[in-house]
């Protein structure tokens, strides 16, 4: 079973600042990683897939990078609506798993 | 528009069964893999199961393997999750989600969830 570890658990920033979120896999997963955003009371929203591809309708301030075991989600300049919880997800050998999440707060 | 609507949640005693359904609209269900993902109260997301576009392959999280069964009826645009031998730790909001592709990868469309509470 592949374990995803996200850091930090909480990121305290202000609007306009840059956010850098990390996700580390317990073994290599090539580029098979996605990032999701979840706001309270809402379903998750796909932001990035295959490590670096933006999903449909996602603003350019969201970018993903990495391969193998280390991945990064960067939010270039935080907007008020970006304060939420972010999860990474992998799908190695067809079985999925999520990281524990990073909360981006003001 | 593309939409997923879950149903079937409720309160159930430990050891009993429950069947969740997910109705798809606005797209051709038969060309996409489909997932179930759950979220316990105040906790993170947990991937539960996936079924390929034609039902030929199914994969489960270890925590539900042997107790839960994912299935689909493409003619009725419906995804199902049969949950047997329910435990307290199965209490969660259950989301159905569409895969980006025909098999098992990432989830680009999500329902709003249905709540399952396992309690005596």
Image (spheres, coloured by chain):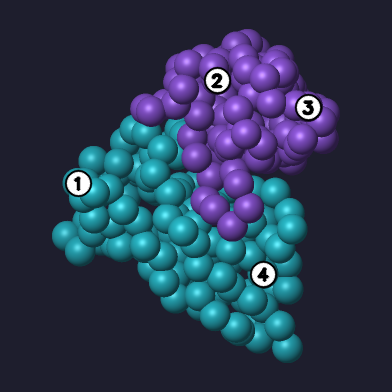
Chain colours: A purple, B cyan
Disc 4 vs disc 3: Cβ atoms closer than 8 Å? no
Judged from the image, the secondary structure of the residue bearing numbered disc 3 is: loop
| Badges 3 and 1, same chain | no
Pointer 2 chain:
A
Q: Residues within 10 Å of mark 3 (few under 14, many from 20)?
A: some
Query: Circle 4 sits on which residue?
Result: B91
Q: Residues within 10 Å of mark 2 (few under 14, many from 20)?
A: many
Query: Circle 2 sits on which residue?
Result: A62
> Please, which residue is most extreme toward the left here?
B75
Estimate the spatial distance between the alpha carbons at disc 4 and disc 3, rounded to whole Å. Answer: 33 Å
Estimate the spatial distance between the alpha carbons at disc 3 and disc 1, rounded to whole Å. Answer: 41 Å
Disc 4 vs disc 1: Cβ atoms closer than 8 Å? no
* Between marks 1 and 2 in the image, the one whose residue lies nearer the viewer: 2
Residue at the (73%, 88%) spot, across then down: B120
Pointer 1 chain:
B
Residue at the (58%, 73%) spot, across then down: B116
* Between marks 4 and 2 in the image, the one whose residue lies nearer the viewer: 2
Name the quadrant of the N terminus of chain A.
top right
Pointer 4 chain:
B
| Badges 4 and 1, same chain | yes
Residue A58 placement: quadrant: top left
Across and down, in percent, residue A105 comes to 76, 37
Q: Is residue B25 above or below residue A34?
A: below
Judged from the image, the secondary structure of the residue bearing numbered disc 2 is: strand
* Between marks 4 and 3 in the image, the one whose residue lies nearer the viewer: 3
Q: Nearer the viewer, residue A36 or B103?
A: A36
| Badges 4 and 3, same chain | no
Query: Circle 3 sits on which residue?
Result: A13
Query: Circle 1 sits on which residue?
Result: B28
């Amino acid at each position: 079973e592949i374990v995803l570890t996200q850091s930090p658990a909480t990121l305290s920033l202000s609007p306009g600042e840059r956010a850098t979120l990390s996700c580390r896999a317990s073994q290599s997963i090539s580029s098979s990683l996605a990032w999701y955003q979840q706001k309270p009371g809402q379903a998750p929203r796909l932001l990035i897939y295959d490590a670096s591809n933006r999903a449909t309708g996602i603003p350019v301030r969201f970018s993903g990078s990495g391969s193998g075991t280390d991945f990064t989600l960067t939010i270039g300049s935080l907007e008020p609506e970006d304060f939420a919880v972010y999860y990474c997800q992998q799908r190695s050998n067809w079985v999925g798993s999520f990281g524990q999440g990073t909360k981006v707060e003001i | 528009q593309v939409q997923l609507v879950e149903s079937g949640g409720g309160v159930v005693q430990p050891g009993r069964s429950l069947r969740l359904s997910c109705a798809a609209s606005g797209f051709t269900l038969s060309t996409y893999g489909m997932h179930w993902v759950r979220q316990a109260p105040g906790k993170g997301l947990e991937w539960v199961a996936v079924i390929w576009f034609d039902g030929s392959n199914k994969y489960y999280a270890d925590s539900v393997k042997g107790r839960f069964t994912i299935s689909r009826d493409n003619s009725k645009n419906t995804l199902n999750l049969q949950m047997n031998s329910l435990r307290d730790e199965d209490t969660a909001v259950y989301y159905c989600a569409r895969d980006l592709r025909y098999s098992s990868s990432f989830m680009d469309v999500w329902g709003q969830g249905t709540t399952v509470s396992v309690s005596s």
